[in-house]
Amino acid sequence: MVTRDYEGYRAGERPAVEVCMGDAWYSGELRAWIRRADTWWAHIDYTLPDSTTHVVTVPSSRLRSDDPRAHDPDTRRAQRPRGAPSEG
């Protein structure tokens, strides 16, 4: 059986991210994290320089952000201090 977890963000609460498409990085919003087997995938909206928007699901390695909420769930859990409350 394949493990699938899902963690979504509501509109207005989505972390800002950049996604690598080819050789370029584009601004976007993280809509959700989806785990398939042992890999976290980011489901994001991103915008091209001509202002067209796209939705794509990419492996976490193609995503970057200064917002800690945009780190995959396993990374966030590992970074949480001992004794800190779990996320809601």
Image (cartoon, rainbow, N blue to C red):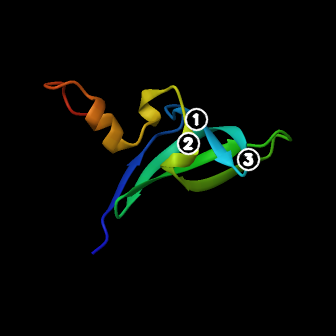
Can you tell which of label 2 and label 1 is closer to the viewer? 2
Q: Is residue 52 left or right of residue 40?
A: right
The residue to which callout 1 is attached is: 17
Look at the numbered disc 3 and give the secondary structure of its residue: loop
**Closest to the observer, 13 or 75:** 75
The residue to which callout 3 is attached is: 23
Image coordinates for residue 86, horizontal then vertical, percent: 21, 33
Cα distance, mark 1 to mark 3?
16 Å
Residue 47 visible (yes or no)? yes
**Closest to the observer, 67 or 88:** 67
Point 69% across, 50% down: residue = 21
Point 27% across, 37% down: residue = 77
The residue to which callout 2 is attached is: 63
Q: Residues within 10 Å of mark 3 (few under 14, many from 20)?
A: few
In the image, farthest residue toward the left: 83
Note whether 83 is above or below 87 in the view shown.
above
Cα distance, mark 3 to mark 2?
13 Å
Cα distance, mark 2 to mark 1?
7 Å
Residue kind at label 3, given as amino acid type: Asp
Image coordinates for residue 27, horizontal then vertical, percent: 68, 36
CB-based contact (under 8 Å), mark 3 and mark 2: no
Q: Quadrant of residue 81 in the image?
A: top left
